Image (spheres, grey):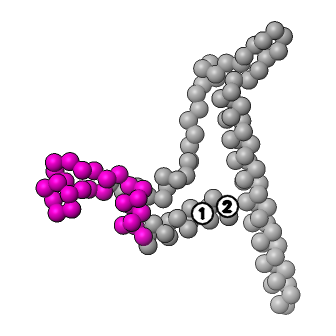
Amino acid sequence: MNPIEIREHLRKLWIKENKILSLIFGNVVINQETLKENKGYKVISNDYNMFFIEVVGVTPNRFRPENKMDDQTFLHSHTIQLTKIININNDLKNLLLKKENEHTVKKDNLELKKD
């Protein structure tokens, strides 16, 4: 399953089971105000988007300088990790495009066989 499909499944699940998922993944607040109410607690709910990262914060290059040892230069460990994230993201995009293209080709082939 790709992340888009997983997000859609979680969205539907969150719509159907909002109450229990809000208790599990939300923030339960117990204070003087909530104790006066019937339940005694208040739930601040999150949604399914909390499981997905859209933006990755990146520190500027000057805070992750290259390391030099003798005549060799090594990238900072944060730079290496960020590069891996970018490469994996590109690989995922390519796989999704490839899967979409294969699906389109199969669909076209089925339509040709019907004719």
Residue 112 lies in quadrant: bottom right
Instruction: Residue at 74%, 23% (x, y): give it.
Output: 75
Which quadrant is the N terminus positioned in?
bottom right
Residue 73 % position (x, y): 79, 17
Confirm or deny contact between disc 2 and disc 1 (CB under 8 A): yes
Q: Is residue 23 magenta?
A: yes
Seen in the picture, residue 105 relative to 76 is either above or below; the reply is: below
**Relative to 50, 97 lies left or right:** right
Instruction: Residue at 71%, 31% (x, y): give it.
Output: 80
Q: Nearer the viewer, residue 58 or 45?
A: 45
Please, what is the three-letter code of the amino acid marked with disc 1?
Ile
Disc 2 from disc 1: Cα separation: 6 Å
Residue 59 % position (x, y): 58, 27
Which disc number belongs to residue 2? 2
The residue segment tinted magenta is 17-43
Q: Is residue 64 magenta?
A: no
Please, what is the three-letter code of the amino acid marked with disc 2?
Asn
**Relative to 63, 105 lies left or right:** right
Residue 61 lies in quadrant: top right
Q: Residue furthest top?
A: 70
Which element type, helix, strand or loop, lies under badge 2? loop
Instruction: Residue at 77%, 20% (x, y): give it.
Output: 74
Seen in the picture, residue 66 relative to 2 is either above or below; the reply is: above
Instruction: Residue at 71%, 36% (x, y): give it.
Output: 83
Residue 56 lies in quadrant: top right
Which quadrant is the C terminus positioned in?
bottom right
Q: Nearer the viewer, residue 62 or 79?
A: 79
Which disc number belongs to residue 6? 1
